[in-house]
Image: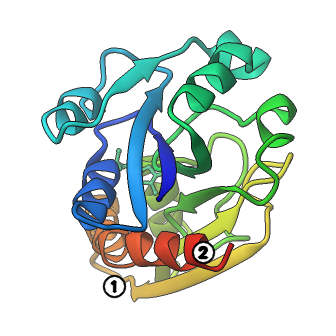
Amino acid sequence: MKNIAIFASGSGTNAENIIRYFEGSKAVKVAVVLSNNQKVGVHARVNKLGVPSFVFTRDEFVEATPVLDKLREYNVGFIVLAGFMNKISERLLHPYPNRIINIHPALLPKHGGKGMYGMHVHEAVVAGGDTESGITIHYINECYDEGNIIFQATCPVLPSDTPEDVAAKVHALEYKHYPSIIEKVLLSL
Ligand code: GAR
C-alpha cells in the first residue's frame, strides 16, 4: 500500500475527489491531509470521509521538522498539493525528491508564479483575452510553478466567459484528471 498525504489550504473539493477515487483501492491510500489554515472547509470535508487532518503554521511548513514528523507517523511516501497556497521549502523537498506534485489551474508556463492562484488565475486568463485555459499537473521544485510538467488538459474560453465560468470548466478538468494522473505517477515509482 502506498500512503499519500494531501496538502490543501481551501475548500478542498479536489482533496475530497481524490479521497473518493482511492476509496477501496488496494494500492493507494490517502492517509492524512495537512493544511496551513484551520478555518477552511477542507477539514470537515475530509474528516467526514474518515481522513484525519492537521494544521501547521507557515513557519512550521518552512522549518519542516513537525511536518516531516507527521508525514513519518502516517508512513507517507508521496505528497499531492491540491490548492495548497504555501511554498514548499527545501527542507520538505529534500526528503521527497520527485515525490511532490501540484495542480495549477491554467496552462503553465502561462499564468504561473507568485500570487497566481485560485480566482486570480482565471481573472488573468479572461483579462488577457485567452481563447483557452486548462490544468497543469507538475512536479514541485524550488521555484513556483516551474517543475517538470506531467500532464496538461485544455478547455475553451469564450469571449462571453466570466472568471467564474472559466473556474467551473477548469475545476471539471481537475476532477476528471487529477486522481488518475496521481495513480499513474504512483504506480510508476
Ligand atoms: C484548484 O483550482 C487548484 O488548481 C488551485 O486552487 C484550487 C483549489 O480548489 N490551486 C492553485 O491555484 C495553486 N497555485 P479546492 O480547494 O476546491 O480543491
Helix, strand or loop for disc 1? loop
Q: Quadrant of residue 72?
A: top right
- Quadrant in the picture for residue 60: top right
In the image, residue 36 sits, relative to residue 155, either above or below, namely above
Question: Is residue 42 at least partly visible in the picture?
Answer: yes
**CB within 8 Å, label 1 to label 2:** no
- Is label 2 within 8 A of ligand 1 (CB to nearest ligand atom)? no
Per the image, label 2 sits on a secondary structure element best described as helix
In this view of the protein, can residue 131 be seen by the observer?
no
Question: Residue at point 31% right, 28% down?
Answer: 52
Q: Is residue 40 above or below residue 90?
A: above
Q: Is residue 186 above or below residue 145?
A: below
> Which residue is disc 1 drawn over?
158
Task: Name the residue: 50% across, 50% down.
Answer: 4
Q: Earlier in the sequence, mark 1 or mark 2?
A: 1
The residue beneath circle 2 is 185
Q: Position of residue 161 (x, y in %)?
A: 29, 74
Residue 46 percent across, percent down from the top left: 24, 38
Query: Is 57 on the left-hand or right-hand side of 155?
Result: right
Name the residue nearer the viewer: 86 or 131.
86
Please state, as top left, top right, bottom left or bottom right, where the C terminus lies in the image.
Answer: bottom right
Compared with residue 87, is residue 67 higher up or lower down, i.e. above or below?
above
Q: Distance between the Cα atoms at labels 1 and 2?
A: 33 Å
Tag 2: amino acid: Val
| Residue at 30% across, 25% down | 40
Residue at 30%, 67% (x, y): give it: 25
Q: Which mark is residue 12?
A: none
Q: Position of residue 63 (x, y in %)?
A: 78, 15
Residue 151 relative to residue 163: left or right: right
Q: Amino acid at mark 1?
A: Leu
Judge the density around disc 2: few (<14), some (14-19), many (≥20) Cα neighbours within 10 Å.
some
How many residues crowd mark 1 within 10 Å: few (<14), some (14–19), many (20+)?
some
